[in-house]
Amino acid sequence: MADQSTLPAALDAELDEVLSMLPLLDVVPALADRVFVRLTDGLVEAVLHDIRVRHESGALDRSAYLTEICGVVVDLQECGLLGADTTGTI
């Protein structure tokens, strides 16, 4: 099967690296928090990237793009997976 990833190469590599560490968590439990943070950050970035790609490809108009991205950001903040941004940018 051909690689269907639309993720940037660096993000794809980061997620592969983090996922490869999961078996180590049984051996080195102290890594769990760091691996969880890296995995969560990578998955959040992948979700936001997917929304942007759908907008750029024309699948989402500007209004739908902004509604979806803002909804995802709010949901992530409410779950504690994304901190409130104090710089004014996403």
Image (spheres, rainbow, N blue to C red):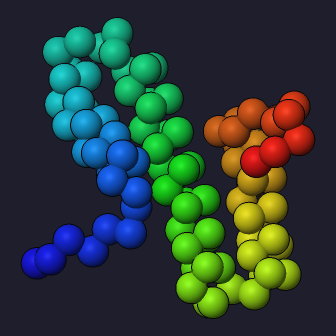
Near-viewer residue (4 or 71): 4
Q: Which residue is located at x 71 percent, y 60 percent? A: 72
Image mark count: 0
For residue 31, which quarter of the picture?
top left
Q: Can residue 57 be seen in this view?
A: yes
Q: Is residue 78 visible?
A: no
Compared across the picture, whether 80 is left or right of 39 comes to right
Compared across the picture, whether 42 is left or right of 90 comes to left
Near-viewer residue (55 or 17): 55
Q: Which residue is located at x 23 percent, y 30 percent? A: 21
Q: Is residue 32 above or below residue 74?
A: above
Residue 65: percent from left, percent from top: 75, 76
Compared across the picture, whether 60 is left or right of 50 comes to right
Q: Which residue is located at x 11 percent, y 78 percent? A: 1
Q: Is residue 50 above or below residue 55?
A: above
Residue 29: percent from left, percent from top: 30, 14
Q: In this view, does 7 lie above or below 10?
A: below
Residue 55: percent from left, percent from top: 65, 79
Q: Which residue is located at x 61 percent, y 79 percent? A: 56
> Which residue is farthest left?
1
For residue 81, which quarter of the picture?
top right
Residue 60: percent from left, percent from top: 69, 85
